[in-house]
Image: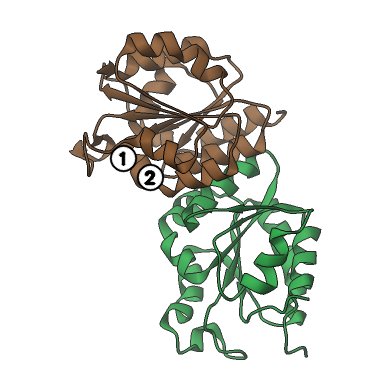
Amino acid sequence: MSDHLTGSLIIKAVKESGIKTVLTVPDKTTAEGLLRPISVDPDLRQISTCKEDETIGISAALSYSGQRSLILIQYTGLLYSMNAIRAVAVDYQSPICFMVGLLGKEPGVLPTESKRNGVRIIQPILDVMGIAHHIIETDDDIEKITPAINNAYDTSRPVAMLIGRPPLAS
Amino acid sequence: MIKRDECLKLLASKIADDEIVVAAYTTAFEWIAIRPSPLNFISSGAMGLTSSHALGFALAWPDRRIILLDGDGSLLMNLGCLVTTANTAPKNLIHLVFENGTYEANGGHPIPGQDNVDFSGMAHSAGYKNCHKISDIKTFEESVGSILQAEGPTFVTLKCETGKNYPQDYRYMHSAKIREEFAEAVKNF
């Protein structure tokens, strides 16, 4: 079993799912391994936003044109955006795809067993809201990404991919 | 001071049938009565996100003009959108803010900074290409044509007050039907 996470492989999986736009607020966990390469990737349009809930409106609107987008944020931003997620993603059944850095989660420890309260509560909150979620912590988990995004768009439902450790840039 | 519904009627007479208009809350109720169309996208459920939806549409269809009917209370809940929009610089976005100084949909209580906040000034500082502040219908009538034609992003503050009463059907506003009609209308865009 792999014990590291490779950013370039994550980005490859994201592209394979048809994502062309990445909406971002920086997150320390994913800043180097994902956001920096995405920001210079000619195949992806990266849009910096000021606050995480903006990304949900933008992503939902893009979906009406058939354009797929990914939201790359930190778990704190996910918590900040709860009402926007509840309304636009859940109640209005929009295909909103989150990739969420779990800042401070201890490698190899389940999020629900983290010493960090903010990390510990993420999955239970997603469960209560009925949002599918997947842990992406090692390279073995990357195969979950493309099917998760495809399923979100096929069923018009949100999904959260939780990044459990800082991805290596390549 | 502009009667909001008079302003909306004037705007409706200046735009084509196939244009997308994104509207929020009380203004949305007036707009859908004045210009009924499946291309009206009503943003509700998360106050403030109207502007973000409009930006998404502007990015999705860069060759189509997107008209955003925002409220001052809504904008205050998502001020960062001014910077995000200006930074993204969609040439096809017209951002109209109806400034009545209240959270009208939430009981009419005053917004913070009522009569002191300069929304157009903030949009200008954020980097919007064109910014206007209009407080009478005659000026709006004279300038709306050029405002709509200018390369954006364009921002207009319209100092307004409520006009006539219009039906407020919240069940329709929150229904899946309204979004399904919009999705169907834009399917071939």
- Chain B's colour is brown
Of B152 and A115, nearer the camera is B152
In x, y percent, where is residue B83? 48, 46
- The residue that disc 2 covers is B47
Please state the total of marks drawn on the protein image. Answer: 2
Chain letter of mark 2 equals: B
Decide: is A137 above or below A88: below
Image quadrant where one finds the C terminus of chain A: bottom right
- CA separation, marks 1 and 2? 8 Å
Assess whether mark 2 and mark 1 are in contact (beta carbons under 8 angstroms): yes
Tint applied to chain A in the drawing: green
**Residue B27 percent location from the top left of the image:** 36, 27
Residue at image mark 1 = B73
Q: Nearer the viewer, residue A105 or B28?
A: A105
Q: Is B4 left or right of A96, judged from the image as shown? A: left
Query: What residue type is disc 1 on?
Result: Gly
Q: Position of residue B161 (x, y in %)?
A: 24, 22
Relative vertical location of residue B151 with respect to residue A14 in this rendering, above or below: above
